[in-house]
Amino acid sequence: PDRARRAWALSQVDGWTYQQIADHLGVSRNTVYNDVKLVLGHCRDVMARLEQG
């Protein structure tokens, strides 16, 4: 989802804290944590497929 991508970018690229992101997006800090975790899991899956060829 778009919100998860935004949360990931704000966290990993812009260096925002989960609380800052939560306040900005109007969601809980736990939701931000879960969204970032979702994106990182997707990245791991893509990397694993690339390594397999």
Image (cartoon, rainbow, N blue to C red):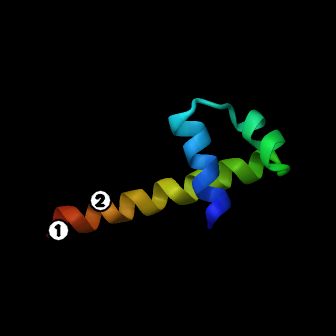
Q: Quadrant of the N terminus?
A: bottom right
Residue at horizontal 56 percent and vertical 60 percent from the top = 38
Is 9 placed above or below 46 here?
Answer: above
How far from the left and from the top, in percent, is residue 16? 65, 31
How far from the left and from the top, in percent, is residue 53? 14, 70
Is 36 placed above or below 20 here?
Answer: below
Query: Is disc 2 in contact with disc 1, using a CB cutoff of under 8 Å?
Result: no
Q: Disc 2 residue type?
A: Met
Of 7 and 44, nearer the camera is 7
Disc 2 target residue: 47
Disc 1 target residue: 52
The answer for how far apart the CA atoms under marks 2 and 1 are is 9 Å
Q: Secondary structure at mark 1?
A: helix
Residue at horizontal 75 percent and vertical 53 percent from the top = 31
Residue found farthest to the left: 53
How far from the left and from the top, in percent, is residue 18? 70, 37
Is 4 placed above or below 1 here?
Answer: above
Of 32 and 5, nearer the camera is 5
Q: Disc 1 residue type?
A: Gln
Mark 2 crowdedness (10 Å alpha carbons): few <14, some 14-19, many ≥20: few
Mark 1 crowdedness (10 Å alpha carbons): few <14, some 14-19, many ≥20: few
Q: Quadrant of residue 19?
A: top right
Residue at horizontal 76 percent and vertical 34 percent from the top = 20
Residue at horizontal 45 percent and vertical 63 percent from the top = 42
Of 8 and 38, nearer the camera is 8
- Which is more N-terminal, label 1 or label 2? 2
How far from the left and from the top, in percent, is residue 43? 40, 58
